[in-house]
Image: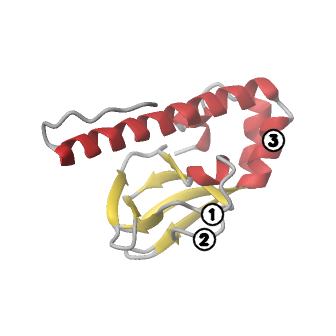
Amino acid sequence: MLIEQAHVFRGVSKETMAKISAHAVEESHPQGSYLFRRGDPALHFYVLQEGRIRLSVGSTGLMAHIYTEPGEAFGLSSMAEHETYVATAECVVPVKVIKIENSRLIQALEQDPISGMQFFRRLASLIGNRLANCYEAALSLQGNRDMRSYG
């Protein structure tokens, strides 16, 4: 899978994608390894090529999300001005990922504001979808009780 095919990069110009790709590194990781843990410095953005990643939060490792589709992006904390990752990414099976240093990615996107806007719109959509999933999970834990949201 080419990085250009990842949903989050759709709409990014060819020139900017060339700059981003120049700094992208393909990595393979064995089952049971961790790409990052909650609290680690958030320095890289990832795109899944193959395999399965479990993203979990909390000290008990509550599952937050499973990534299985090539092109899915994770390590979003690195692009949202978080100093550390807010979750842990574990390889459920052997995986291949594309890893991009967040400072290089931001630099390339700042040099092309239109592409930067496309990227961050898609990133916001990903974060919004995950937030909606969290709301649904919270509602399912509450049963049928009315749970008000003020945001």
- Residue 13 visible in the snapshot: no
Q: Establish if 11 lies above or below 37.
A: above
Model colouring? secondary structure
Question: Disc 3 on helix, strand or loop?
Answer: helix
Mark 1 lies on a secondary structure that is loop
Of the residues shown, which amino acid type is indicated by label 2?
Answer: Asp
Comparing 80 with 23, the one in front is 80
- Labels 1 & 3 near each other (Cβ < 8 A): no
Relative to 140, is 31 above or below?
below
Toward the right, the furthest residue is 111
**Residue for badge 2:** 40
The residue nearer to you, when weighing 70 against 116, is 116
**Quarter of the image holding residue 50?**
bottom left
Residue that label 1 marks: 84
- Dot 1 surroundings within 10 Å: few (below 14), some, or many (20 or more)? some
Visible residue check, residue 57: yes
Which residue sits furthest left? 144
Q: Give the residue at mark 3.
A: 108
Q: Nearer the viewer, mark 2 or mark 3?
A: 2
Q: Is residue 103 left or right of residue 69?
A: right
Tell me where residue 42 appears, x and y as whole percent: 65, 62
Q: Kindly identify the amino acid type of the residue bearing the numbered disc 1.
A: Thr
Pinpoint residue 150: horizontal percent, then vertical percent: 42, 31
Amino acid at pointer 3: Ala
Alpha carbons under labels 2 and 1: distance apart: 5 Å
Query: Mark 1 and mark 2 in contact (Cβ < 8 Å)?
Result: yes
Distance, label 1 to label 3, CA atoms, is 22 Å
Question: What is the C-alpha distance between the residues marked 2 and 3?
Answer: 24 Å
Pointer 2 local density, CA inside 10 Å: few below 14, some 14–19, many at least 20: few
Q: Earlier in the sequence, mark 2 or mark 1?
A: 2
> Residue at the spot x=44%, y=76% of the render?
33
